[in-house]
Amino acid sequence: MMKRQNAKVFTILALIVLSILVYLAQNKLDPYQIRILNLGAIYVTLGVSLNLIYGFTGQFSLGHAGFMAIGAYVTALLVLPPYYKEMIFILEPLAWPFTVIHAPFLIALLCSGLMAALAAFLIGLPVLRLKGDYLGIATLGFAEIIRVIANNLPHITNGALGIKGIPEFTNLWWTVGVAVVTIYIIKGLVHSSYGRALMAIRENEIAAEVIGINLTYHKVMSFTISAFFAGVAGGLFACLLTTIDPKAFMFIMTYNILIVLVLGGLGSITGTVIAAFLYNFLLEYLRPIEAGFQIGPIVFPAIPGLRMVTFSVVLLVLIIYKQSGLMGGFEFSWQAFFQFVNKLFTKKKPTEGSTS
Amino acid sequence: MSLSLLLQNIANGLSLGSLYALIAIGYTMVYGILRLINFAHGEIFMLAPYFLYFGFLIFHLPWWVSVVIAIALTSLTGMLTEKIAYRPLRDAPRVSVLISAIGVSFFLQNLAIVVFSGIPKSVHRPKFFTKIFQLGDIRIQSTLFASIGISIIVLSLLIYIVYRTKTGLAMRAISTDIETSRLMGIEVNKAISVTFIIGSALAAVGGILWSQRFPQLFPTMGMIPGLKAFIAAVVGGIGSIPGAMFGGFILGMSEILFVTFFPGSSGYRDAFVFLILILILLFKPDGILGKKVQEKV
Amino acid sequence: MREILNIDNITIKFGGLTAVKNFILKVFPGELIGIIGPNGAGKTTIFNMITGIYKPTVNKIYFQDTDITGMKPDKIAKIGIARTFQNVRLMENLTVIDNVMIGFHLHLQSNLLSAIFKFPGYAREEENIYQKSIELLEKVDLEEYKLEKAGSLPYGQQRKLEIVRALATRPKLLLLDEPAAGMNPQETKELMRFIQEIREDFNLTILLIEHDMRVVMGICERILVLNYGETIAEGNPEEIQHNPEVIKAYLGVEATYA
Ligand SMILES: Nc1ncnc2c1ncn2[C@@H]1O[C@H](COP(=O)(O)OP(=O)(O)OP(=O)(O)O)[C@@H](O)[C@H]1O
Ligand SMILES: [Mg+2]
């Protein structure tokens, strides 16, 4: 039996190893590879946060792109220096208070999370009464409304032109750091009495309510926390891409996260983490397909769109043939890890007799 | 505002509504049977005018022949998406099917980019659709009448099929209870295929009429109309065919009237549509014509 | 003594159907009352109204003098009413022990933050909940299955688990909807003992819907008979067994359950 104390030690060790890896990656890899890893880590945050509301609480939310958008705009407006902002806002002059506010990245990210959480709270109170697909469509509607608003508030968002020249603060320390904090907090929540309440709601709403679980409180809490991390991820995203506009937060963004979630297996944090990176690797490594390539004497011309066609086919095949997710609901724990290692170990030395 | 302008806008709203209604039927029928929001339906809608474009401009077929071929090919595509991407997932969790549907939508969009290229194409408009009618001081293009007229004909045909034929009976049976229908010897898969064929054919008609009204083709053109038609289906009461028609007209009408009365906020047009959706969901979640179902405990 | 539950002449309609009509019931602390009646008589509907899932169309329900009509189910659970369902409603994909521990959530003192970060106060509370849950599971011999998925248990054990989950909420009034359904005679006998036992251990008042006459006649002091939403008889088992009205409406049906 693993002791709690031991698990803690191993976790700390693992974090140290992770830091070393991040250090090496940040210094040794080329910018292109780093960018893919950054995207992967941001998707971890997004996927794990969506997992909270959908995978664990069972509330079908398609609004993540909207919360990301809020986060992205808040961070962009806070980290850009005022003089620069006044310069790029050409459609309409920038509105107060953004003309004077300037904040460090960390503060900006926290504000992003809080604003997204506030939006989620206000939206969630009425909308989380809905169930299933209806909830999905309503939250999708809100995400679209947020996008339309971003398009139509030129003195805050610079309208369809978007905001350019956002400082590239995002690096692996930030993205991986945020991902680790997200996992820590959401895991902490899920493995608590509150998390049990969320899962009870997912499993059987009527039974949950009848044993005294306040549905509104728990659903809104889960939705708000989920949106908080989506907002933070949006901020990271803005400072990774350095350019944002309303088009970046179309439904396809939510869809990408949903794929990560389903590929990783609903309700599995481990699966989400693996799927988040796999997804981004796959997306990038299919890029040559559309750039045109040569196999022997045959030259394949560049065909725009082919990458996405291939990609959607791969996804469809994965979804159809791996219905319970890549990890089949498996969840990492040190105990399972050492059992696994133990098994490997005993298999290698069958002569030493039974180890039961 | 002058009365004539108002009338003109009403005609405008009705014709937009008739297009939404045509697309909404496909959503509502599929949802009624599979409990699936067929996200690929908007792309089915987009394919029809492309097929027409190619038939007419590239293969030089007569326009009406191209229309028939386009509708047939679109229906075939609709049926195939169900066979390939939804049927294997019949017993899977619903979210897998949904993801699969969005995947198909994504696939068709990108396939369209590969095959038709992303450059917008302009559409041929036969005289029939471009005549201008002058009624007093209102000028109305025949597209408006044509789309209303054609929609009404097509929708009547649909009602006939669904409520008066054996196939229609089978479709209604499986939307009430798929398992019992199977036990009673209804060929469920066949009925589902027919549902997709009919839904896609209607979307094709809608897509072609749409391209007469907004004569430009691009691979993502199905997304917004598709989403709005889905909203129309929900507003009318998802699963209900009359509901989808009614919802389509209501949505088209409110959208046009919103733009008419608040021209300054026309940028918020899509947001307004979503707001209607959310309000309906909150206050009448089963839609205007939908049946109220309370879960028995 | 004051009644713990006072159902004051309630009626509920679903569209044109009157599922329960002019239902009156006063329950005194410590009582064990049986509700019987043919299928569709409205028994479950009464439970649904007491637990806030449905709201009576006419009149009120009082629990310890508080008007609970139309109150949300979770509030009603908090003030001390728990129930089981005719068609067992467990959290099927959660473990057996989680299904019991979740019953304690409504009395949790620790706030969200201390739960997420496992502050000592929370850790103590969680440990306490765990111990109590194990004790409850031991009472129904389910302790050895504590890490199994609840949905994988045989039906009879799922019913017991559901009762235990209800007990975890520390109710004063417990509503059992056909607890013996799907149990074999041996299990049924154990169940009867179990109901008697928890009634004493937890000072419970119990309302029991049951088709199995041996259970109802065996443990209830007072029985109500419902038919088409109306109370057609009320009395002790002896009286009910000899009531001609009941024999006409119900006991003819009983043969199929015996
Ligand atoms: N939500 C609802 N909507 C419509 N009718 C309902 C609803 N709930 C219950 N009914 C109807 O009310 C009547 C009483 O149902 P109820 O479930 O209370 O019966 P019951 O006495 O528990 O029967 P059984 O012994 O079969 O469990 C039935 O005719 C049932 O169909
Ligand atoms: Mg019942």
Image (spheres, coloured by chain):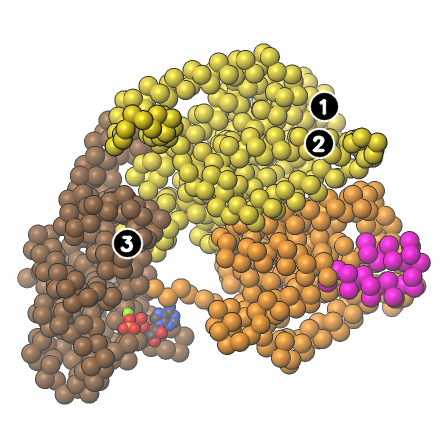
Chain colours: A yellow, B orange, C brown
Give, as a three-letter code, the residue at label 2: Arg
Of badges 1 and 2, nearer the viewer stands 2
Task: Indicate yes or no whether the magenta region holds residue B70.
Answer: yes
**Is label 2 in contact with label 3 (beta carbons under 8 Å)?**
no
Q: Chain of mark 1?
A: A
**Dots 1 and 2: beta carbons under 8 Å?**
no
Disc 2 crowd, CA 10 A, few/some/many (<14, 14-19, 20+): some
Circle 3 crowding by C-alpha within 10 Å: few under 14, some 14–19, many from 20: some
Label located before the other in sequence (1 or 2): 1
Q: Which residues are magenta?
A: B50-75
Q: Secondary structure at mark 1?
A: helix
**Front: mark 3 or 1:** 3
Mark 2 = which residue? A287
Q: Please tell me in which quadrant of the rendered image residue B87 appears.
A: bottom right
Residue C153: which numbered mark, if any?
Answer: 3
Residue under the image location 63 percent in, 37 percent down = A249
Which quarter of the figure has residue B89? Answer: bottom right
Q: CA distance from mark 2 to mark 3?
A: 49 Å
Q: Is residue A295 left or right of residue B137?
A: left
